[in-house]
Amino acid sequence: MNHQSRIDFVAEKTFRTAWFSYIRLVELGNDMECFRCGGTPAVTIWDGVTLSFNRKNILATLRPPTMVDKESEVKTGIKPQHGLQLIADKPLRKNIHTVLDGKPLSLPRLPDESDGPPVPSSGIKEMMDRVKLVPSVVAHLSELDTHLATLFDQYFGFGYLLSKGSPPRAYKALFLQVRMCFRCRSQLILFADSDGGECTPIYQ
């Protein structure tokens, strides 16, 4: 991170723990729910504001809030909050990673049978093992969120692989982000095409 400071920024893990601890204190509810669309609108748009100040105000006395001095408050017994992932099920996160990691998912063609029974190569076997995991991922995702499960099945299920081939890269990126992200729903955005076509997932 280039913040043009002689003082090192806190580690990523420390920053993430502080941020999500703050989010937990805020206790965001469902008061922003649309009365017409309900709790699961087809498209959501999130906006953010970055606060800054003029360079002339960067004085020698300016210190980042992470700098420790003799007047800093000491809090003991602070432990990171666990289980903040959007998908708390660790085996499910692993299976999603297995399905999406590596070459684009596809239904491989077996070798020509003219030379005898086909013997799948290690690459074909690995791809088929990934494809076979899709129904299990969809089933477990449906226990978490039916919309995520439907989306995963729509672009990684057998129907899509048979008719259109490899899934779009945008959906692979989306689910890799969903697999890793924490329970901050503002990280997920659905952007609708201007012509009213299908939505493209975008993540922050």
Image (spheres, helix red, strand yellow):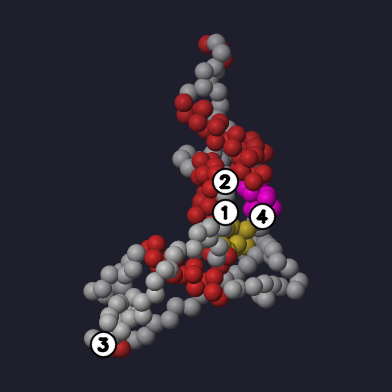
Q: Residues within 10 Å of mark 4 (few under 14, many from 20)?
A: few
Viewed as shown, does residue 74 lie left or right of 202?
left
Residue at 31%, 84% in the rendered image? 71
Magenta highlight on residue 143: yes
Residue type, label 1: Ile
Q: Residues within 10 Å of mark 2 (few under 14, many from 20)?
A: some
Q: Residue furthest right?
A: 36
Badge 3 is on which residue?
61
Residue type, label 2: Leu
Badge 2 or badge 4: first in the primary sequence? 2
Q: Are marks 1 and 3 in contact (CB under 8 Å)?
A: no
Badge 1 is on which residue?
87
Q: Are marks 3 and 2 in contact (CB under 8 Å)?
A: no
The CA span between labels 2 and 4 is 13 Å
Residue at 63%, 40% in the rendered image? 136
Badge 2 is on which residue?
92
